[in-house]
Image (spheres, rainbow, N blue to C red):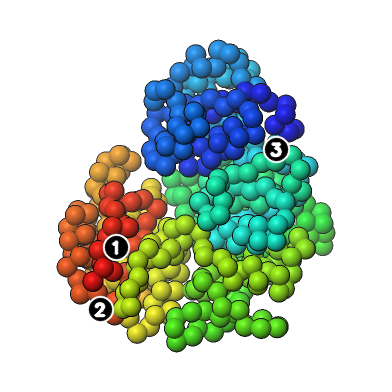
Amino acid sequence: MSTEAYQHIHMIAIGGSIMHNLALALHRKGLKVTGSDDEIFEPAKGRLAAEGLLPEAEGWFPEKLHSTPDAVIVGMHARPDNPELLYAQEHNIPIFSFPEFIYEQSKNKQRIVIAGSHGKTSITSIILHVLKYHNRKFDYAVGAQLEGFDLMVKLTEDAPIIVIEGDEYLSSPIQRVPKIHKYHHHIGVISGISWDHINVFPTEENYREQFRIFVDMTPKAGTLIYNQDDEQVQEVCVPNDSDVNYIGYTIHEHKIKKSGKTVLKTKKDDVEIQLFGEHNLRNISAAKEVCKQIGIKGQAFYEALATFKGAARRLEKIGENEHTLVYKDFAHAPSKLKATSEALKKQFPDRKLIACLELHTFSSLNKDFLPQYKGTFLSPDVKIVYFNPKTLEHKRMPPLDPQDLKAAFGDEGIEVYTDNQALQEYLLNNNWKDKNLLMMTSGNFGNLDLQQLADTITAS
C-alpha cells in the first residue's frame, strides 16, 4: 500500500530518533502528520519545530485522534496503556509499528535488511553511500545521521529497492517481536551476534534464537550474507536450504601504512580508505557482497568507498593535532567495546590509548550482565568506566558498587567515575603528547560536551 492511501497519519512517540525522521519524511511527501510525546529532546525538537510538526505541549492527548487519522504509528517509547493508543484500539483506527509501516510502504520493492548485534549501522551506511555515489534510486531507514543525507528515512513510490538497518529490539509496546522479523527481507545480512537487551531476551539462547528466526525467514531465491568469523552467527546461518543463496564474508585483505591509514588490497589497485579496524574491514566485506547482489561490483564499489567518511558516532574523529587524536563511538555492548578499543590501539600502536566507557543501557548496568564484559577492555593503556547513578535511579535499578564492576570486568586497574565533572577534570589535566582518547557510549556522559572536550585537548 502506498502512502497515497493515507492523508493523515498520527505518530505516538513522535520524538524518537527514527520516529521523528519518519515524521519528517512523510510530511515532505505531502501527508498530514500529527504526533505526541511526553518528552522530546534535541535534535528532534528543533527539527520537528522547523517544519511545524512539534506538538504544542508534551503529553498524550486522545482528542488529537478525534478527527480519525487514516493510520497511527506507535513508537517503542510508548507504553501499552498509552491513552492515545487505547483510543486508536477502541475506535479501530489502523495501528502500525515502525517496521510494519516501513514494510507496508515497500511491499513492491526489493528489501535489504542489515541485522546483527554490532556493525549494522556501518554496513548500512556504506551501502547507502555507494548507492548515492552511483546515482541509484533507493529508499532507506538507517539508525544514524549520515553525511550527505538530510533524513534517516526515505520513502518514495518509484525506488526499486529499500535498505533497512534491522534492529532486533521489539517492534512496539503491543507487538513484542523483533523489528527484523517484520521487514520480510529478500537480502538479509547478519554482522555478528553478541547477547544484548537482557531486559527483553533473558538468556543468550533466547537472544540468538531471534536471529535464527530471521535466517529462516529468508525466502526462496533470497540471499543470506553472514559473518563467517563469528561463532554465534555460524550457529544460526547453517546453509540448510538449497533455495537460499548463502554468502559468508570475512576481513577484507588490507595493510596499514605508517601514517595510520588503511589500504585495501584489490584485484586491480590498492585503495586507501578513511575507515580502520578489523570490525570495519568485515563491515566493508559485507557491504561489498550486498552491492554485488544489486549490480554494483568491484571497482565501482571501491571507487565510492574511498570517499566514505563513516557514520556519525561510529569511530568518529572529533579532534586532532599532530600528536593526539580524539574519537567518539557508539560502543557500549561488550563486543563493540572490544572491537573499537582494539581497532584504535592497533591503528596507532606507538601512542598510548586512554579509553572511557559509559555504562548507560539496561543491559550494561545490570549486575547479572556485567560479567559479559570480562576480557573485552584489554587494549587501552588507561581504562575508565563511567556511570551516572541517576541513570540507575531512572531505570529503577539497584546501585552499582565500583569494586563489583572491576571484578566483573576482571581488571582491578580500571578507574571508575560516577561524576562527569571529575572525569572531565582528569582528562583535561592529562599530558596528551603521543596519546589518543576514545569516548564510548550510547548516552552522553551526563551531558558532557564531548566536542568542547576534544577541542580543548587538541588545542595545545
Q: Badges 3 and 1: C-beta atoms under 8 Å apart?
A: no
Q: Nearer the viewer, mark 2 or mark 1?
A: 1
Q: Badge 2, how many Cα within 10 Å: few under 14, some, many 20+?
A: some
Left/right of residue 223 with respect to residue 283 in the rendered view: right
* Spatial separation of the CA atoms under disc 3 and disc 1: 43 Å
Q: Badge 3, how many Cα within 10 Å: few under 14, some, many 20+?
A: some
x and y, in percent, of residue 79 in the image? 46, 30
Is residue 210 depicted above or below 190 in this figure?
above
x and y, in percent, of residue 300 in the image? 71, 70
Which quarter of the image is occupied by the C terminus?
bottom left
Q: Nearer the viewer, residue 156 or 331?
A: 156
Residue that mark 2 sits on: 433
Left/right of residue 12 with respect to residue 235 in the rendered view: left
In terms of secondary structure, where does tag 1 sit? Answer: helix
Q: Nearer the viewer, residue 252 or 6?
A: 6
Q: Nearer the viewer, mark 2 or mark 3?
A: 2
x and y, in percent, of residue 127 in the image? 64, 60
Q: Badges 2 and 3: C-beta atoms under 8 Å apart?
A: no
Tell which circle, 3 or 1, labels the residue nearer the N-terminal end: 3
Can you see residue 12? no
Q: Residue at x 70, y 38 (%)?
A: 105
Residue that mark 3 sits on: 105
Q: Residue at x 50, y 21 (%)?
A: 84
Q: Amino acid at mark 1?
A: Asp
Residue that mark 1 sits on: 455
Can you see residue 254? yes
* Spatial separation of the CA atoms under disc 2 and disc 1: 15 Å
Q: Amino acid at mark 3?
A: Gln
In terms of secondary structure, where does tag 3 sit? Answer: helix
x and y, in percent, of residue 418 in the image? 21, 54
Q: Badge 1, how many Cα within 10 Å: few under 14, some, many 20+?
A: some
Q: Amino acid at mark 2?
A: Lys
